[in-house]
Amino acid sequence: MTCTLVLPHWLAEDIEKAAQDPLETAGVLLASMCNLADGTRKLLARRIHWVPPEAYRHRSGNALLIGSDGYVPALQEAETIGACAIWFHTHPSHIGIPLPSSHDDRVDEQLSDLFRLRTGAEVYGSLIVSPGRGGFTFSGFIEGDRWRAEIDRLIVVGDRLRFAKTFRAGCDEVSPEFDRSVRAFGGAVQASLGELRFGIVGNGGTGSAVTEQLVRLGARKLALFDPDTLTTSNLTRVYGSRRTDVGRPKPEILRDHLLAIAPDLSCETHNQSILEEAVARQLASCDVVFGCTDDNAGRLVLSRLASYFLIPVFDCGVLLSSDASGQLTGIDGRVTTLCPGTSCLVCRDRVDLRRAAAEQMSAAEHGRLAAEGYAPSLGRVEPAVVTFTTMVAAAAVSELIERLVGYGPTPRPSEVLLRAHDRETSTNIVPPRDGHYCDPAAGKLGTGTLEPFLEQAWR
C-alpha cells in the first residue's frame, strides 16, 4: 500500500539543512495521517520539533543518545493538534545512506508504543534522511498494531515542486520516447511526471488541452472529473472528441483518446461533480490538481483542498468580453497556483461567493430563491474559443514544469494573467488574509481529513 510523505517547502528546507550537518541531528515531525479513498495513505507534515542541544547526551557523526526531554514536549503538542509523531534523524554526508542500523531498529522498538500512547495516535513513524541529489534522500515507515508500511514516496510542495522515491527504490529508467523532453529538463523531472498522480477537474476545452499536454509530456497516472456529457457545441474545443461522441460523458471520451496516445496510461474517470462529498474525497488521492471548471462552487472546493491536503492546484480561467454590438473586446486568461503559503482563490477575490452558494443549492431551492430575488440566475452560456482555452492550458502546464525544473525568476509568482487582446502578460503575488484557512498561522495547512470534509457544507 502506497504511503506518501508531503512536506511544505519550508520544512523540507530545514530537513535539507540538517542533513548537511556533519553531526547526526534528530527531531520529531508532526503530521496528519490520511487514509484515502483509493486505499493509499498520505502523511501531511505540519511541524518539526528539533531536539534541543541540551537534550543530546551524546552526539557524533554516526551515533546519537537523547534524553526524553528531547521529544516528550513534541508528543504533547502532537496530541493537542491531533497529529501523529514521526521520529526523524539524519545520517550525515560521510555515511550518506539513509537506511536504519541495528541500533536504529532498537530505538524504534523502544519509541513506538510510547509515541502512540503520548500522542493518542494510532501510528508511529520513523524517518531517516541523508544528503543527496536534489537536497536529500530518505527511507522510513509508519506502523500500527500488527502492521507496518514503508514511506515510499515524498513530495515537496510550495515555491518548487519535488518528487522522490525512497532510497530503497533505486533509480528509474526513462523511456527513449521522451528523449527530446529529457534534453530540455532532465531525467529526474521526466521520471517525476510519470510518477505523480494528476487530477483534472473539468474536461472541456481547457481541461482536455491540459490533459493531452500532460500525457504527451509523460504523465501516466490521471483522474478525470466532469459531470457533463459532450454536446455539439463542445466539438469545437474538446480535444479528442468526435461527432459520434455527442452524448457520451466527457471523462470517458478523453480517456479513450489518451489511451490511444499512451496505452500504458492509468486513467480513472468520474462523471460526477466535485460538489458531491464522495467525489471530492477522491481528489485527495491526487498529488497535483488542475482546476479547469467554470463554476464558483467547484473552485471553493479546490481552494480548500490545496490548503487542507497540501496539494498544488493550478486553477485556470478564460473570459471573453464583447461590447454592446457583439464585437470582441477582451480576451483574458488566468492561471493561479495554490500551494502552502500562497493565498487561496477567496483571498484573491477569484470566486463569486454569492454564485457559489447558488450553485450548491438544489434546483428547487435555487428556483424558489431566484424567483424571490435572493439568488443569482444560473445557466448562462459564456463564449469560448479553442485558441484561447488552449493558450491558457499551455500556460498552466508551463507553470507545473517551471516548478519542477526551476528555470524562472524568484520569488515565483502565484498568478499569471494573460491579456491576449493587448498582447500582454503580467504576474503577481498576493499574501493570504490574516487568519484565513490558507494563512499558515491559522493552523489549517495539512490538517487533512477533518469532519466535515474540508470543513465546509456539502449537498
Image: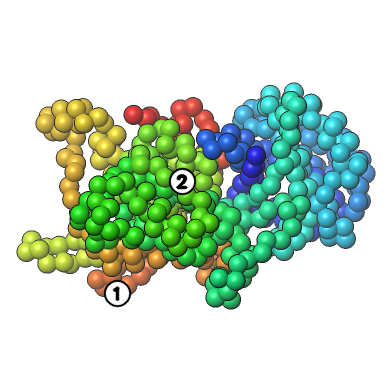
User: Residue 189, percent across and down?
Assistant: 59, 64
Rendered position, 398 above or below 277: below
The first of marks 1 and 2 along the sequence is 2
Mark number, residue 240? none
Q: Which residue is mark 2?
A: 268
State the image quarter where residue 206 is shown: bottom left
Q: Which residue is mark 1?
A: 423
Q: From this viewpoint, is residue 89 visible?
A: yes
Question: Can you give x and y, in whole percent of width and height, for residue 419 in the image?
Answer: 29, 68
Q: Quadrant of the N terminus?
A: top right
Q: Residues within 10 Å of mark 1 (few under 14, many from 20)?
A: few
**Residue contact between numbered discs 1 and 2, judged by CB atoms under 8 Å:** no
Q: Residues within 10 Å of mark 2 (few under 14, many from 20)?
A: some
> Please, what is the three-letter code of the amino acid marked with disc 2?
Glu
Q: Residue furthest left?
A: 325
Q: Residue at x 24, y 62 (%)?
A: 236
